[in-house]
Image (cartoon, helix red, strand yellow):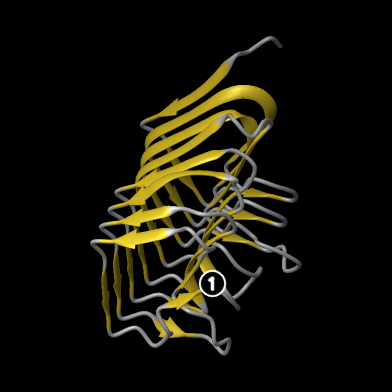
């Protein structure tokens, strides 16, 4: 097929599963993926991306809710809710108004409720609450091009790190409240030199604030 885009709007994915990647949605093609106003509950993949796995020409996900989604790969970042990459570094992954709750459903997999790989990354207005990872971070971006990460909340999660950026980023107007610490001793934010953190609130977290 010569499709240039794939769009899912007003969808519900309940207890969907995959023996490989992407419990509900799997994309491995240079097309534009758009998922809007949809709900994922109890979705599971045996490898990566419990709700969505996408290696595409661009990803746009907005107004989505992920509840009790899980990915079982325990060797790296699982992406219990989403595992998003692009074919080229300049292609964009945009996450807006996402809600991630009680992921994973059981203690499976490893780290990252949301994982973003090769792309230009942007995340805004999203909420992570009552999520638990085995070792490290709730959200991880491996992208070299990071647009501002803003207006996101991490509340009542259990993790070593709330967010990890492998390259410099601007973090603006985010909340980190009452997050429990795993065994590791990282800060609640792990980022690189030349990153900027502004207008953000840290309250009752068990982790140190930052790790460079």
Q: Which of 174 and 75 is in front in this view?
A: 174
134 relative position to 67: left or right: right
Q: Nearer the viewer, residue 37 or 128?
A: 128
Q: Looking at the image, is 191 positioned above or below residue 106?
A: above
Q: Can residue 106 be seen in this view?
A: no
Classify residue 165 by image quadrant. bottom right
How far across and down, in percent of the image, does residue 14 sit? 48, 48
Element marked by disc 1: loop
How far across and down, in percent of the image, does residue 1 sit? 71, 11
User: Which residue is at 23% across, 61% downward?
Assistant: 199
How far across and down, in percent of the image, does residue 43 sit? 54, 53
User: Which residue is at 42% across, 84% downward?
Assistant: 208
User: Which residue is at 59% across, 47% downward?
Assistant: 143
54 relative position to 34: left or right: right
Q: Looking at the image, is 139 positioned above or below residue 37?
A: below
How far across and down, in percent of the image, does residue 5 sit? 55, 18
Classify residue 153 by image quadrant. bottom left
User: Which residue is at 60% across, 78% downward?
Assistant: 135
Residue under pointer 1: 212
Number of residue marks = 1
Q: Looking at the image, is 135 positioned above or below residue 7?
A: below
- Image quadrant in which the C terminus is located: bottom right
Q: Is residue 127 visible?
A: yes
Q: Residue furthest front?
A: 194
Instruction: Assess disc 1: are there few (<14), some (14-19) or many (≥20) residues with their C-alpha within 10 Å of its C-alpha.
Output: some
Q: Which residue lies furthest to the top in this view?
A: 2
């Amino acid at each position: 097929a010569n499709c240039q885009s794939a769009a899912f709007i007003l969808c519900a994915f309940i207890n969907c599963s995959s023996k490989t990647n992407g419990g509900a949605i799997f994309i491995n093609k240079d097309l534009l993926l758009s998922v809007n106003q949809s709900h994922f509950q109890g979705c599971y993949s045996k490898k990566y991306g419990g709700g969505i796995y996408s290696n595409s020409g661009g990803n746009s996900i907005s107004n989505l809710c992920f509840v009790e989604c899980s990915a079982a790969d325990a060797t790296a970042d699982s992406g219990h809710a989403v595992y998003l990459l692009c074919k080229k570094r300049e292609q964009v992954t945009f996450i807006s108004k996402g809600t991630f709750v009680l992921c994973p459903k059981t203690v499976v997999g490893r780290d990252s409720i949301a994982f973003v790989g090769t792309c230009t990354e942007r995340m805004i207005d999203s909420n992570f609450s009552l999520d638990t990872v085995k070792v490290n971070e709730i959200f991880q971006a491996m992208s070299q091009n990071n647009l501002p990460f803003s207006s996101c909340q991490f509340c009542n999660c259990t993790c070593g790190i709330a967010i990890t950026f492998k390259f410099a980023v601007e973090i603006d107007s985010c909340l980190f409240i009452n997050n429990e610490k795993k065994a590791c001793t990282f800060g609640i934010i792990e980022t690189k030199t030349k990153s900027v953190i502004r207008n953000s609130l840290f309250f009752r977290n068990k982790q140190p604030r930052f790790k460079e």
